[in-house]
Image: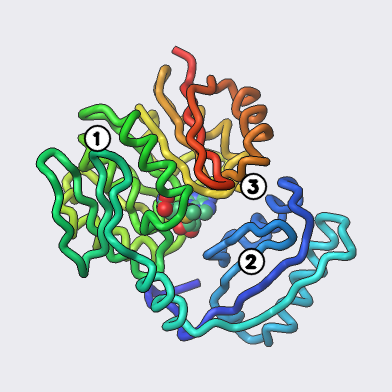
Amino acid sequence: MTGDRPPDRWLVLRILAPADPEVRSLMVECLLEEARGVEEQDDALVIHLPPPEGQSAEDFARALRHSLVERTGIDTLEIETGWQPHEAWEDCWRQHFRPRRITERIVVSPSWETPEVEPGQCLVTLDPGMAFGTSDHPTTRGCLRMLDRWVEPGIRMADIGSGSGILAITAALLGAGEVLAIELDPWACSAARENVVLNGVEDRVEVRAAPVTSDGLPGEAPFDGIVANIESGILLPLLPALHAALEPGGWLVLSGILRNEAEGVLAAATDAGLHFEEADEEGEWWTGAFTAPL
Ligand SMILES: C[S@@+](CC[C@H](N)C(=O)[O-])C[C@H]1O[C@@H](n2cnc3c(N)ncnc32)[C@H](O)[C@@H]1O
């Protein structure tokens, strides 16, 4: 994947496979470099990809199916292909993005609207481009509510999978002294950097284009707090690395987790040596806060 311009259209893959976290995690791993807009459904994973280079969508899907069947052992696995024009994608979220009050203190608004805010409220202004993170999704809102409770003035933080930069920017506006926003998608990073400037927090937020892997964070650990809104299939193998990147007593907020996955995440976080502190639930989504032992 090169350049910072999105393609004209997106290949949409619907991978029909069981909602088993290990299987899903393997699938996302196979597609990690290219996948964006990964959506977990009960019976399928829906993934948007740039058009494959030098081969048809069908050939790409056939080769992917072959490697997924080999890795998961599920030979009933099917992949449906489709296309979505880039404009359709952009138009879709623009229509849904309205100013929204998340907590007493946090209001999120698209850059093309000017909502009234009360004294003491923090207004997060965004033009997310094609990056995830408008506050329309319950996982983003769960993280914002947690940040409202856990961010303390002057702390050093990391935002893993920062998308539009919404969480990193909010943390800075709530008083974090330094926030490293890490995101593997270069297009999302471009949008996040613009949003950082839009909110006047460029002295406190750095956006870094890099993947977080189980080898560790591409940043200057340790941090006082880490927020990671990525799906649980990706998060689980990262837990030991996230714990290692925390100060003793530091906190970790995890989201992108379905309620029925929460038990598995709690067990994995405990195995990784983290203490569970509190949960936030909205619809079918679960967000958890954990701390590292002192
Ligand atoms: C669900 S979005 C969250 C965006 C934003 N933080 C929010 O809360 O709305 C997850 C983001 O994580 C990024 N991502 C997924 N795996 C990653 C990894 N291993 N390292 C860094 N970023 C990753 C994706 O590209 C995507 O932008």
Q: Amino acid at mark 1?
A: Ala
Left or right relative to 263: residue 254 = left
Q: Position of residue 193 (x, y in %)?
A: 27, 59
Q: Position of residue 203 (x, y in %)?
A: 16, 46
* Measured Cα–Cα span from mark 2 to mark 1: 35 Å
Point out the residue furthest to the top here. Answer: 294
| Marks 2 and 1, the one that precedes in the sequence | 2
Q: Amino acid at mark 2?
A: Val
In front of the other: label 2 or label 3? Answer: 2
Q: Determine whether 88 is above or below 278 in the image.
A: below
Judging from the image, the colouring scheme is rainbow
Q: Is residue 98 visible?
A: yes
**Would you name the residue on which mark 2 appears?**
46
Q: Are the residues tagged 2 and 3 within 8 Å (C-beta)?
A: no
Res. 106 image quadrant: top left
Point out the residue furthest to the left here. Answer: 119
The residue drawn where x is 55% and y is 45% is 285
Q: Amino acid at mark 3?
A: Gly
Task: Say what secondary structure mark 3 lies in.
Answer: helix
| Marks 2 and 3, the one that precedes in the sequence | 2
Q: Position of residue 12 (x, y in %)?
A: 61, 75
Q: Is residue 183 visible?
A: no
Task: Say what secondary structure mark 2 lies in.
Answer: strand
Label 1 crowd (10 A; few <14 / some 14-19 / many >=20): many
**Would you name the residue on which mark 3 appears?**
233
